[in-house]
Amino acid sequence: MRPIDFVGDIHGHATALRELVHQLGYRLRSGSWQHPDEARLVFLGDLIDRGPEQRETVELVHGLCEQGRAMCLMGNHEFNAVGFVTPRTDDPTRHVRSHTDAHIRQHQAFLDAYVHHPQDYKDTIAWFSRLPLWFEQQGVRAVHACWHAPAQALLEPYVDAHHAPIDQSFFTDSAIEDSPAWHGRETLLNGLEMRLPEGSHFRDYYGIQRRRIRVNWWDPDQSTYRESAVIDASQRDRIPNLPLPSTAPSYHEQLVFFGHYWMRGAPRIQHPRAVCLDYSIALPDGALCAYRYQGESDAQVSHLSWVTHT
Ligand SMILES: [Mn+2]
């Protein structure tokens, strides 16, 4: 089979991306991307925001995609970029991604990168709006944050055979909090949440009372809410140490790659069937990580590769 290289979150670090793509054996020869084993790439989303080279990152990934050498999944940041310029259907004076100070701050570097390139900006938003939400081929899967069949089922009415949005309704319907599309999109692009048992809650870092936690759906060996919570180690004690219900997600299916979770330290295989490839390249000591899939059913540590800031 043709190998598939899955690549984690890039967040505007085109220099690291160029180095990684080169390390993986891809070469641009007379305008055309080549690989000696005819390998192809699957990007796990979050190309943009935070980093210094956002337009360069989009250009490189888009170029690889246009030549049939790559495909790119939608991350929550690509969703937000489209949502930032998409009016809500329930209140057209507002946008799918609201223009709060915090949201503008998070997105300003992307807007600045295109300020003198209005046509590129239009083309990029149009490309983002058509990125698939998940990938499943040749016995392997990928998604930005969480593989979850019930969430995919909620989004089936909005996507084509490649799991890409058919039209704007994916963006406008999933802007309506608590709608089926909102639940589906939140789970796939931002991660799975679970409600704590009735009567139970915790106070987060800011003192806000919460009844839901984000769970590490990819680890099948957890037994309590506290173990399962995706939360900074210093905050874990805040989560009730109560047993998870039998309905809690426990991923035992075919190999899946995902990004989104800002893993720290040296890239590793957390679980042989569910591998996070986001190693926080947006941080000074982070890495941009890839995995070369060659048909194996369990992930092998020797298939990981990565680059760091030099
Ligand atoms: Mn993300």
Image (cartoon, helix red, strand yellow):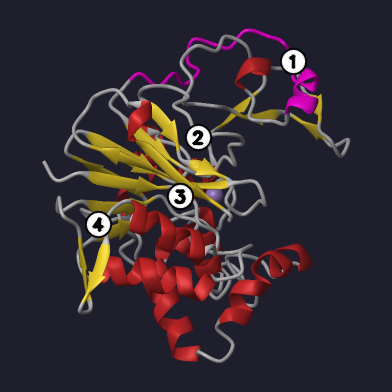
| 87 and 116: which is toward the camera | 116
**Residue situated furthest left in the rendering:** 1
Mark toward the start of the polypeptide (1 vs 3): 3
Mark toward the start of the polypeptide (2 vs 3): 3
Visible residue check, residue 258 = yes
Mark toward the start of the polypeptide (2 vs 1): 1
Point out residue 269 in the picture as x, y percentages from the top left corner: 44, 26
Residue 266 left/right relative to 1: right
Q: Residue at x 47, y 15 (%)?
A: 247
Q: Are marks 2 and 3 in contact (CB under 8 Å)?
A: no
Residue for badge 1: 240
Q: Nearer the viewer, mark 2 or mark 1?
A: 2
Residue for badge 2: 267
Residue 38 left/right relative to 287: left
Q: Which residues are magenta?
A: 233-252
Q: Helix, strand, or loop for circle 1?
A: loop
Residue for badge 3: 181
Question: Quarter of the image holding residue 154?
Answer: top left
Q: Is 191 contained in the magenta span?
A: no
Residue 224 left/right relative to 291: right
Q: Amino acid at mark 3?
A: Ala
Disc sitting over residue 160 in the figure: 4
Q: Residue at x 57, y 51 (%)?
A: 281
Disc 4 within 8 angstroms of ligand 1 (CB): no
Q: What is the distance, in whole Å, between disc 1 and disc 3 at their CAs?
A: 30 Å
Q: Are marks 4 and 2 in contact (CB under 8 Å)?
A: no
Q: Is 249 contained in the magenta span?
A: yes
Point out residue 291 in the picture as x, y percentages from the top left corner: 35, 40
**Residue situated furthest right in the rendering:** 207
Q: What is the distance, in whole Å, between disc 2 and disc 1 at their CAs?
A: 30 Å
Visible residue check, residue 197 = no
